[in-house]
Amino acid sequence: MDYLFSIIFGIIQGITEFLPVSSSGHLVLLHKFISLPLKNEIAFDVVLHLATLFAVLWFFKKDIISIIKSFLLNFTDKKNSESRIGWMIIISAIPAGFVGYFFENIIEKYFRSVLFVAIMLVLVGILFIVMEKISKFNKDYKNLKYSQAFMIGVAQCLALIPGTSRSGITIIAGLSLGLKREQAVRFSFLMSLPIIFGASVKKIPELFNSGLQSNELIILFIAFLFSFLSGIITIKYFLRFAQNKKLNIFAYYRFILAMLIIYYFIIN
């Protein structure tokens, strides 16, 4: 059953990391219902996030290679639009990197609860509905200014609170700047790379220093694999969905999930 549960964790992470419904919020809830023989749940969640990092790297490998090449050529004065994207990704990572590094322990202590998950599910859902009404949907992310990329990065700080959704809040920030839905989604995925990588580098050593048993390693591997595979599939179809569909459906899902959480954990 532990192996089956690890598959469930992996699939849920792979789907919810990229859909704007909060992967961390879903993981908090899963840990309430499903008990795995783990010494460090948060580090386990980081492994799942690391799998989705690899999913982004795999899906956007051509774009990422092009961005890296152009970024390096930028230092030889051969500037182009691809090198700008590299700088925008770095700039957008600064705010969340700063907040995560200095306030991570406080966030984990006070905000990792089902109540905050429910609150953030509702608030971000409302923002989705508002942005669908007021956004102009007329810009490509390649045309963002550096200051606008930084603003999206500031919004990303809220994703440290479970229930917010990293992709959700950055997509909303992109829409507020007039990005087309698909472009906001694409930039959200690309800008996730340094943040997920940084969190993984910081947390993964804690996992292995705790002394993993062979059973735990198998659980981690299975969860990682299914998170990676489901992440690739989700990226592909979400980008296609965002090209011509409104994102309100995710707001309604967030509202329903929040009501279920409030009833089950708080009222009942």
Image (cartoon, rainbow, N blue to C red):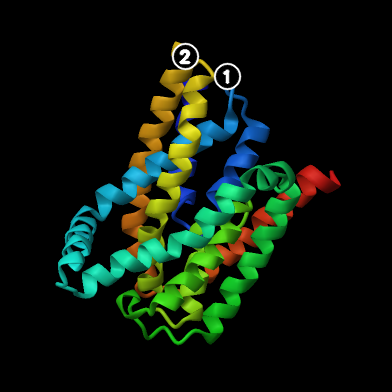
In the drawing, does residue 74 fall left or right of residue 45?
Answer: left
**Mark 2 and mark 1 in contact (Cβ < 8 Å)?**
yes
Q: Secondary structure at mark 1?
A: loop
Question: For the point 61% across and 37% down, which residue is it?
Answer: 30
Crowd class of label 2 (few under 14; some 14 to 19; many from 20; radius 10 Å): few
Locate residue 87, reporting x and y percent: 33, 66
Mark 1 or 2, nearer chain start: 1
Which residue position holds label 1? 37
Locate residue 98, reporting x and y percent: 54, 55
Q: Say if 90 sits above or below 129 in the image.
A: above
Question: For the point 22% across and 63% down, which residue is it?
Answer: 71
Question: For the point 38% across and 59% down, which residue is it?
Answer: 189
Question: For the point 49% across and 42% down, which residue is it?
Answer: 12
Q: Quadrant of residue 76?
A: bottom left
Which residue position holds label 2? 215
Q: Secondary structure at mark 2?
A: helix
Label disc, if present, on residue 182 of the rendered structure: none
Q: Residue furthest top?
A: 214
Examine the rendering and report whether any part of residue 241 can be seen. Answer: no
